[in-house]
Image (tube, rainbow, N blue to C red):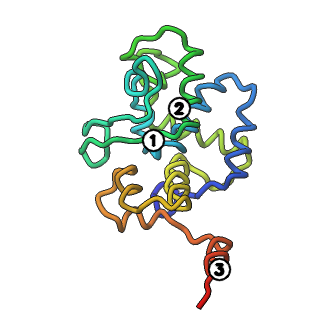
Amino acid sequence: LGSGGKAKNLTSEEIGRVSKCLTGTTHELRNRALFYLGLGGGFRIAELVGLSVIDVKNGKVRDQVVLDGRSTKSGKSRTVYLSDQAREHVKRYLDSRGDVSPEAPLFPSQKNANKALVANAGVQLLKRMFLAAGVDQASSHSMRRSHANSLRRNGVDLKIIKDQLGHSSLAITDAYFQVDPVEAQQAVAGLKF
């Protein structure tokens, strides 16, 4: 489940179930921000939980996040563009936190608000969210794969998706995609010769 080629691609219905499950929970705004930032940015879990407030907000919520090489798997910096939906959830979450230091972790640890949530805690948190929503076989990497598949379905160039995800080759990015039988049928049905 952890690798890009094997992580579950979430359906719209499953995303809706996770969202519904979060309603009224203790950390609803934080968990929505984490979930939708993962979906709307395609971050790896370590990149996501390692963000600081200043990474996503400088006066207003940014439309892109610049990850430096210390926080990426490849050791190279990259720009991650954010969906409007992700930005809106981050805004609500940050508004609920009030006046926090720009250097503060975006997703602080429960035990120490000055330290970021560690990747394993983020993985476990998402696992509990998926279980509560009845979404089987999903993992933290499912958000990343779902991000890539949504971009592909929207006709985004494979090179843009590769850069968004921070992959070193198109072959790695290609492993994220699954053939949707309905999409394949519709594509072929429209052919005329």
Q: Say which amino acid is labelled 2.
A: Arg
The mark closer to the camera, 1 or 3, is 3
Q: Quadrant of residue 179?
A: bottom right
- Residue under circle 1? 45
**42 sits to left or right of 65:** right
Q: Residue at x 74, y 48 (%)?
A: 134
Q: Earlier in the sequence, mark 2 or mark 1?
A: 1
Question: Where does the image place residue 16, in percent across and percent down from the top left?
Answer: 72, 45
- Which type of secondary structure does the marked residue at label 2 adopt? helix
Question: Where does the image place residue 91, in percent across and percent down from the top left?
Answer: 55, 24
Q: Say which amino acid is labelled 1.
A: Ile
The mark closer to the camera, 2 or 3, is 3
Query: Marks 2 and 3, Cα distance to the nearest angstrom?
Result: 36 Å
Q: Residue at x 68, y 72 (%)?
A: 182
Asked if residue 115 shows in the view, the reply is no
Residue 190 tag number: 3
Residue 115 tag number: none
